Image (spheres, helix red, strand yellow):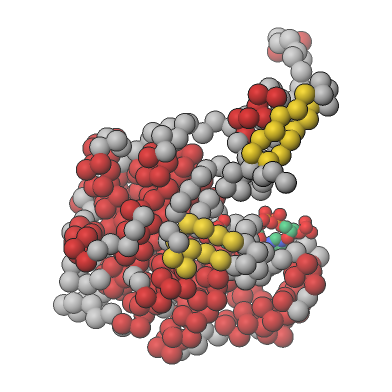
Amino acid sequence: MTESITITDNRSGEQIEIPIVNGGVDASEWGKLLPGVWFYDPSFDHTAAAASAITELDGEKGILRYRGYPIEQLAEQSTYLEVAYLLIFGELPAPNQFEAWVHDVTYHTFLHENVRKKFMDGFHHDAHPMGVLVSTIAALSTFYNDAKNIDDPADRYKQIVRLIAKMPTMAAGAHRHSVGMPFVYPDNNLDFASNFLSMMWKVAEPQYEPNPVLSRALDVLFILHADHEQNCSTTAMRVVASSLADPYVSTAAAAAALYGPRHGGANEAVVRMLGEIGSMDDVGDYIKRVKAGEVRLQGFGHRVYRNYDPRATIIKQTADEVFEVTGKNPLLDIALKLEEVALADNYFTSRKLYPNVDFYSGLIYQAMDFPIDMFPVLFAIPRTSGWLAHWVELLDQNARIARPRQLYDGVPQRDYQAIDKR
Ligand code: SDX
């Protein structure tokens, strides 16, 4: 048996054999046999839009690996900044490389004062922080003209460091603006997660004292959210970057995609759903509404995972550590009951609907006092390293501009009618 497929054009009887390589077939080959005939796949369910060495998923087995390392080992033994380095440069850093990387990120956390004072402060007081973040990421493009030198390794590195470093500063700044609190400057004595917590919560104390359990839990959540192969927001990053747009506007496009409730907005939707259910006694009624197609079970289901999302398992363990410090989130019992009822119901198991990364993450963020509308922002901070890893990979592959075809199903040609004739 050869690892190949044969396509026959029944109109002409012509055939073409295409080898199956690395789990895929080269679409340009059948273009030779079928010019002008397109494979219709609008949500890319059956289409590989890229060849990538960054993240490997196995949806059936519930496997997630970053550059070959299992997510469970990285969550247990690594840190977010080390994982960001791994995703972008392909290898775990040597001690000197890691020291330089952490130094560079730490010393690029500040924002140009105009970004905060003239741009971020211009938003309405109740602006959604994700809308502020998406806009501010794009605005950074106007502050760094060297960002357009995307083929210069030194300039490319500078933008990568700036974006990873400034995401927490912009994120915390958006929150502080929304609650009328003064902006908190980065504290270079703190690690990445602790510095973010300081910029979020510092009040009048001379230096913010992070709770080490909460800092570590947040760092683990950042690791789990760092990349996830060709998800919606990463696809947006690759499409926009394929036009050779600079990394700031490409990242803004990716963050915009993440904002949607089907994607990064899901953990916000989960907590709102749990609040709407209100009590464990009402779980059954909500499940009935889901099965009637009236509502979706937020935090359940995944395009790739047809099994438990491995990140959800780790997040559930992290939740216990956080609740030890913060006290249990009252919505947790409702979530656990929902999961128990859903996983015993054929409606969900037959559709391979299991808890995904978002089902429990929102409960942790809420227990850590993050406002609900900050949840997608907390997803965007670490996913920036994944987006940038794909940006670098796409440029190194000399990828062509993304320009899919379509099936036209509009009206045939017709002549213009003057307005007095309509
Ligand atoms: C993330 O791609 C990634 O990697 C994303 C992500 C990442 O790290 O980047 O993993 C992060 O975005 C996780 C997903 C977060 N979203 C949610 O939790 C929102 C709720 N889930 C969904 O809306 C849905 O499951 C999606 C969007 C996640 C996946 O949708 P698909 O693959 O397009 O599935 P579908 O909409 O075609 O549904 C298939 C069937 C349908 O039923 P039938 O028409 O066959 O009767 O499953 C049903 C759907 O109605 N279904 C659900 C459901 N999700 C799918 N029914 C109830 N509740 C749900 N959550």
Image quadrant of ligand 1? Answer: bottom right
> Residue 248 falls in which quadrant of the image?
top left
Residue 8 sits above or below residue 90 on the image = above
* The C terminus - image quarter: top right
- In this rendered view, identify the residue nearer to me: 161 or 293: 161
- In this rendered view, identify the residue nearer to me: 108 or 224: 224
Q: How many marks?
A: 0
Residue found at x 76% / y 18%: 412
Residue 364 sits above or below residue 407 on the image = below
Q: Give x and y (percent) for residue 210.
A: 28, 80
Q: Give x and y (percent) for residue 256.
A: 47, 49
Q: State whether residue 253 appears in this view.
A: no
Q: State whether residue 20 appears in this view.
A: yes
Residue 283 sits above or below residue 174 on the image = below
Q: Please state if 148 lies on the left or on the right of 407 as rendered.
A: left
Residue 29 sits above or below residue 177 on the image = above
Q: Please state if 334 lies on the left or on the right of 147 as rendered.
A: right
Residue found at x 43% / y 90%: 324
Residue found at x 33% / y 53%: 89
> Residue 297 falls in which quadrant of the image?
bottom right
Q: Give x and y (percent) for residue 327.
A: 45, 89
Q: Please state if 155 lies on the left or on the right of 177 as rendered.
A: left
Residue found at x 47% / y 68%: 70
Q: Give x and y (percent) for residue 41.
A: 68, 40
